Image: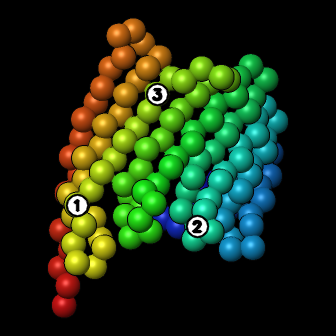
């Protein structure tokens, strides 16, 4: 299903796919012929992960945001196939006086290969207030 920036459904799911939303309109599950996806959010709607189940595997992504509610884009996430960790992601940001991220560093580690491969990214946001 297509979702908006807020993870709310923007369009009807494709034929053969059914979905469920919570009381806030967030997509919490999608079920098709060959797989099921479940999405998790915190009380404010911040995504905490998803689990995709098909006949061969279970893929889960679990995110843990910063304890500081103003810095939710500082997070770590772990990806697992069945019970085997296959990757992790860490993002840390610098924030402006309005708690908006202006400079973030993202590190993605692919642990499914040996040796593990790290990818480093910088994300810069420019916000003009008026």
Label count reads: 3
Q: Residue at label 2?
A: 45
User: Which element is circle 3 on?
Assistant: strand
| Residue at image coords 67%, 40% | 51
Q: Is residue 107 above or below residue 81?
A: below
Of discs 1 and 3, which sits in the foreground?
A: 1
Q: Position of residue 97 (x, y in %)?
A: 22, 78
**Of pointers 1 and 2, the one earlier in the residue sequence:** 2
| Residue at image coords 47%, 17% | 112
**Of pointers 2 and 3, the one earlier in the residue sequence:** 2
Residue that protrudes farthest toward the top in the picture: 114
Q: Is residue 21 above or below residue 24?
A: above
Q: Residue at label 3?
A: 87
Image marks 2 and 3: residues in contact by CB distance under 8 Å: no
Would you call the spot at circle 1 few (<14 residues within 10 Å), some (14-19), or many (20 or more)?
Answer: some
Image marks 1 and 3: residues in contact by CB distance under 8 Å: no
The foreground one among 49 and 31 is: 49
**Of pointers 1 and 3, the one earlier in the residue sequence:** 3
Of discs 1 and 2, which sits in the foreground?
A: 1
User: Can residue 31 be seen from the camera position used here?
Assistant: yes
């Amino acid at each position: 299903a297509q979702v908006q920036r807020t993870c709310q459904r923007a369009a009807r799911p494709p034929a053969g796919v059914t979905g469920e939303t919570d009381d806030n309109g967030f997509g919490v599950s999608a079920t098709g012929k060959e797989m099921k996806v479940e999405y998790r959010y915190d009380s404010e709607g911040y995504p905490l992960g998803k689990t995709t189940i098909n006949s061969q595997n279970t893929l889960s992504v679990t995110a843990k945001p910063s304890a500081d509610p103003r810095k939710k884009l500082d997070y770590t996430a772990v990806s697992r196939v069945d019970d085997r960790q296959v990757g992790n992601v860490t993002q840390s940001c610098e924030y402006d006086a309005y708690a908006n991220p202006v400079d973030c560093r993202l590190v993605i580690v692919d642990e499914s290969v040996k040796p593990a491969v790290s990818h480093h990214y910088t994300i810069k946001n420019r916000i003009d207030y008026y």
